[in-house]
Image (spheres, helix red, strand yellow):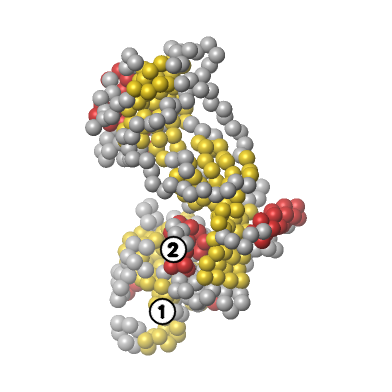
Amino acid sequence: MTTLKKIILLAIPLAFCTFLALGSIPSTDRQSDLTSANAIASVPPEPPAQENNKTNQDSFHTMVEGELRSGDTLSRSLARYSIDPLVRQLILDNLSTCLDFKRLRPKDKYRVYLDDEGQLLRCEYESSPMESYSITRMADTFVAEKDTIDVDVNTCMIEGVISTSLFEAFSQQQLQPALIYAFADIFSSRMDFNTQTQKDDSFLIVFEKYYKDDQFIGYGNILYARYQQCSGEMYEGYFYRSEEKAGSFYDTEGRELGTSFIKSPVPLGKVTSNFNLRRIHPISGIIRPHLGVDFAAPAGTPVMATADGKVSFAGFQGGFGRQIVLTHAGGYKTYYGHLSRFSEDLQCGSAVNQKQVIGYVGSSGFSTGPHLDYRLQQHDKFYDPFSMEFQPKSVLQGEELARFQNDINVLTRLVGSTSLPGTLYVRHLVIEPDEQLTLL
């Protein structure tokens, strides 16, 4: 049922920030649940005011709040909330100039503000916490635009110790899977978290958490990651965005952590069979070479290409079931068997990028359960993927290296300045309409 209420509309100018402010602000508890739909706002909107525009000042209006249901069009949803047909058409005509209606989804939220004569004053449409649009009446016309978004970015530090698995250790810290996978991905070319994690290994991660109106909306960049094996081996990765390429992770010497091949196409799967020239086959019982690695994972788990390449085969291949074969530079080939299905639009000749999802774990062919059979071949000889060493994709040099090392010195001092995990600092960020922000 639609809820209506008379509230006062105040015309307050909006100040648009063009840069972010960085400061030391104490952390606060954050709400994680979204405000329920159809609630009445206790604070009126703040449409832009102009010196000669007194139309919206101190006038009473009604606010109607709603959200799209499955199968809705915006027009149908507005009609369900008893919005007048002429007002509905004004909203549709103006929003269509800045919002693609093909991208509307169930749970999108909107607010409509009407004056005391039932005429449109303002409409706000939110397709996600990071994307909203508005229509505002200005004298005898309407201005429709994509809005700026104000967020707080908390830079946080978390430490932990492995007892059973990396996933379990992160989950104990109430960290969401997106951050776990991103952490594992940083070191995917250096170590395999399926086979090389041990009890009492430790980790440290410095990362960004984004909040809007005190509500957590997602993780930003990981700025620093460290994994310390109890055997003494330590891996570190610093995030750095150079002038010539997108951000990536580097070690302290400026070597990019990413290599031509990553270790595993299923980062957090369970290895059930290693590369073995004298393995007893689990179905036939015959000793025969196992020229790859088996990763057990739930059916439907995404499988990634371990390197840039092209699809040379995608189909059914006997005991391997649904299989993809990729060819790579340097005479390499990789094989992905027992898949449940392939990614859409994947076909022979398709170019794929490293870490691109190419298929999904299954149990097709000769298989005792859902798993991936992964193989690495060079010049007709198969190799153990876990024993191969590859060169870094890039190495920072000259002025670029100097800038990078200055950045990591600042971050290292910040991390070293506290002995307690938590929020290191908070900054305010204004995202302009033409800017894109990608969250994990």
Q: What is the three-letter code of the residue carrying label 2?
A: Ser
Tell me what residue is drawn at x 33 percent, y 82 percent: 282
Q: What is the three-letter code of the residue carrying label 1?
A: Ser
In the image, 105: left or right of 436?
A: left
- Element under disc 2: helix
Counting labels gives 2
Asked whether 114 or 399 is in front, the reply is: 114
User: In x, y percent, where is residue 56?
Assistant: 44, 16
Quarter of the picture containing the N terminus is: top left
Tell me what residue is drawn at x 58 percent, y 48 percent: 26
User: In x, y percent, where is residue 160?
Assistant: 52, 67
Marks 2 and 1 sit apart, C-alpha to C-alpha, by: 27 Å
Q: Quadrant of residue 396?
A: bottom right
Q: Residues within 10 Å of mark 1 (few under 14, many from 20)?
A: some
Q: Earlier in the sequence, mark 2 or mark 1?
A: 2
Q: Residues within 10 Å of mark 2 (few under 14, many from 20)?
A: few
Tell me what residue is drawn at x 51 percent, y 22 percent: 12
Q: Is residue 109 above or below residue 411?
A: above
User: In x, y percent, where is residue 372?
Assistant: 38, 70
Q: Is residue 424 above or below residue 103?
A: below
Asked whether 382 or 125 is in front, the reply is: 125
Examine the rendering and report whether any part of residue 438 can be seen: no
- Element under disc 1: strand
Tell me what residue is drawn at x 48 percent, y 20 percent: 11
Asked whether 264 or 228 is in front, the reply is: 228
In the image, 30: left or right of 226?
A: left
In the image, 216: left or right of 155?
A: left
Q: Quadrant of residue 100?
A: top left
Read off the residue under disc 1.
Answer: 273
Read off the residue under disc 2.
Answer: 171
Examine the rendering and report whether any part of residue 138 can be seen: yes
